[in-house]
Amino acid sequence: ERLVGSEMCIRDSSKYSIIEMELPSSWAGSSLVTLDIRKKYDVNVLAVERDNDVIVNFAADEPLLDGDTLLVGGSREMLDLLQNQYN
C-alpha cells in the first residue's frame, strides 16, 4: 500500500517522532533563525500554533510570541533532550 499526503506522517516510530511543545518563555521575542534550533538540537520546527491558528509556512525570521506552541519533528532522543531542557 502506498501512503500519500497526511498518511505519510510518522507512525509509531521507535526512532522519530513529532511533538507539540509550549514555547519556552526565554524564547519569546526571538526568531527561529536566532534560536538556531535545527543546529542546536537537530530537530525541525514544522509549524507554529498561535491564537488557535496553525501556521505551517512560518517565516524563520519572524519573532515567536509568548503563548505560541511549536510542532517539532526529529529523533526521539533529541526531542527528549529539548523537552527536558525546557520543561
Image (tube, rainbow, N blue to C red):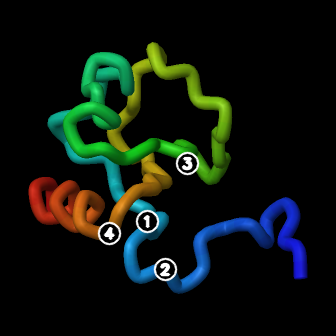
Give the residue type that dot 3 points to: Glu
Alpha-carbon span between mark 1 and mark 4: 9 Å
Which residue matches tag 1? 19
Give the residue pinned by disc 4: 76
Q: Which residue is mark 2?
A: 13
Check disc 1: other Cα within 10 Å, few if <14, some if 14-19, many if 20+. Answer: some
Residues marked 3 and 2 touching at CB (< 8 Å): no
The mark nearer the N terminus, 3 or 4, is 3
Q: CA distance from mark 2 to mark 1?
A: 13 Å
Question: Which quarter of the rendering shows the N terminus?
Answer: bottom right
Left or right: 52 as drawn, with respect to 36: right
Q: Is residue 27 above or below residue 30?
A: below
Image position of 40 with respect to 87: above or below: above
Q: Secondary structure at mark 4?
A: helix
Query: Which residue is denoted by mark 3 in the rendering?
Result: 49
Amino acid residing under circle 2: Ser
Q: Are marks 3 and 1 in contact (CB under 8 Å)?
A: no
Question: x, y (%) of residue 48?
Answer: 53, 43
Which of the two discs, 3 and 1, labels the residue nearer the N terminus?
1
Q: Nearer the viewer, mark 2 or mark 1?
A: 2
Residue 77: where, in percent of width, then height?
24, 66
Tag 3 secondary structure: strand
Other residues around mark 3 within 10 Å, as few (<14) / some (14–19) / many (≥20): some
Measure the alpha-carbon separation of dots 3 and 2: 24 Å
Mark 2, Cα crowd under 10 Å, few <14 / some 14-19 / many 20+, is: few
Labels 4 and 2: the sequence-earlier one: 2
Q: Nearer the viewer, mark 3 or mark 2?
A: 2
Residue 31 percent location from the top left of the image: 36, 21
Of circles 3 and 1, the one toward us is 1
Q: Look at the numbered discs 4 and 2 and tell me whether their residues touch, using CB distance below 8 Å.
A: yes
Of the image marks 2 and 1, the number of the one nearer the N terminus: 2
As helix, strand or loop, the secondary structure at mark 1 comes to strand
